[in-house]
Amino acid sequence: MSEYQVNKTYAEINARIKAGEAVVVTAEEMVDIVRSEGPVEAARKVDVVTTGTFSTMCSSGAFFNFGQTVPTIKAQKVWINKVSAYAGLAAIDIYLGATELAEDDPLNKVYPGEFRYGGGHVIEDLVAGKTVFLEAKAYPTDCYANRKCKKELTLADMPYALLCNPRNGYQNYNCAVNFSDRTVYTYMGMLKPGCRNANYCSAGELSPLLNDPLYRTIGIGTRIFLGGGIGYVTWHGTQHNPGAPRGENGVPRRPAGTMMVQGDLKQMSAKWLRGVSIQGYGCSLAVGIGVPIPILNEEMARFTGVSDEEIFTQVVDYGHDYTNGIQRNYGEVSYAELKSGMIEVAGKKVPTAPLSSMVKAREIADTLRDWILRKKFLLSEPVAHFPTVDFSFDNDEDS
C-alpha cells in the first residue's frame, strides 16, 4: 500500500457532515474522479460515495403486529387481501413474504397459471396508504378466547410494521440466456429459445456491494436508504458467498455477498417499494436501496472508483443448466457491454435487457447524497463485519 495512504475515521467524516463541509459524490461520479486524479488524491478530496439500486428482490417481506381484538386472539392462520402470512410467532405478530401468492386471485381465472397479486403488492398497498382486508383464524385458549377475526385496516392502524428482508442487494448476478428450444419464464424474466435475448440484474458501478467488494464498511449496523426511508444492515444475507471468484480489483465475477436489511415500514414510500408480477414465475417486491460508502482511505477510493468496464459477470443458461444444477459458464461479459444493449454469446450477437432500473438507482444515489449534504443522514460504523476473504492490491503504480 502506498506511503501516501489517506486515513479518515467515521467520527471525522460525520463531523464534516455536521459542519456542512463534507464532499459527497455518487459512485458514477467517483469513477471519473479516481480515473483523472488517482485513488490517493480522490481519498483526500472525497468523504462519502453514495450508491443505489432498484430491482426485484424476492427474499423480502415484513413483520406486522395487527392489533389485538376483543376478546383477545392468538392467530394461527392469517391472510391479508387473500395473501397468506406466517402466524407461527406470538398472538398477533405475523410475517408476510413478498413472493407469497394470493389464494384467490381473480385474474388467475382470466390468465390460467398466472398470478398478478402477492405479498409484494400487499406491502406496496400498505405503504401507499390503502386499506387492506385482514382475516385471522385461531384455536381458543383461556388467555386468547377469540376464534376468528375479520377487519379492514391501514398501515397507520397497525401498532408495528417492520420491513425485514433476508437477502437484498446481491453483489453481482448472472446474465441469463436460454439455449433450449423453447421459451422459458424465470425470475430473470422471459428468455427466448436459441439464445435470442439476455437479461441481467445489477446497477453495475452504482450497485452498493460492488463499491465495497470486501465489506470493509458495509456490515452490521450500517445505516442505509431503504424503501424511501432510513434502514439498517442487520446481518449478512442468506446465500452470502464471499468466496466467489474475484478479479484483480477485488470485485466478484459471480454472485457473492448479500445483505439482510430492515427498517420502519411506516417511514417508507410506494415509490421505492413496488409489487412485481413476473410472467410464469409469480410475484415479488422491487426494493430501493442506497448505501453510503465512507472514503476512509486510498483502498476505499480504489474500490468506489470501479467502472462498468471493470465489472464482469458470467453468462448462464436458464433453459437447462440452471434448473439442473449444472455450473457451466458460457463466457463473461462486462456491465459496460451489457448496458450497451448487445453482447456476444457463443459467436452470435444477443440483445440485452436490464431487470434493474438505472434511472431509479441514480435517483437513490442522488437522494442519499442530498440527505447527507442537508445533514439529515450521518454514517454509522458497523459493530461487526461480514465474512470476507483476504485481498490486497499488488500494484500501486497509479498512486
Image (cartoon, rainbow, N blue to C red):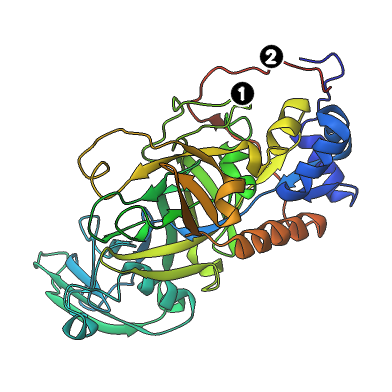
> Which residue appears at 16% of the width and 67% of the height?
77
Q: Are marks 2 and 1 in contact (CB under 8 Å)?
A: yes
Q: Quick check: 385 above or below 167? A: above
> In terms of image quadrants, where is residue 282?
bottom left
Q: Residues within 10 Å of mark 1 (few under 14, many from 20)?
A: few
**Residue 5 x/y as whole percent:** 82, 21
**What element does badge 2 sit on?**
loop
**What element does badge 1 sit on?**
loop
Q: Residues within 10 Å of mark 2 (few under 14, many from 20)?
A: few
Left or right: 97 as drawn, with respect to 290: left
Q: Quick check: 217 above or below 92? A: above
Quick one: 51 or 350, which is closer to the camera? 350
**Residue 179 x/y as whole percent:** 29, 49
Q: Which mark is residue 394?
A: 2
For the C terminus, which image quadrant?
top right
Left or right: 359 as drawn, with respect to 193: right
Q: Quick check: 254 above or below 228? A: above
Q: Quick check: 54 above or below 117? A: above
> In terms of image quadrants, where is residue 38?
top right
Q: Which mark is residue 391?
A: none
Quick one: 84 or 293, which is closer to the camera? 293
| Residue at the spot of label 1 | 248
> Which residue appears at 50% of the width and 33% of the height?
253
> Which residue appears at 19% of the width and 66% of the height?
75
Report how many numbered discs are placed on residues in the image: 2
* Dot 1 amino acid type: Glu
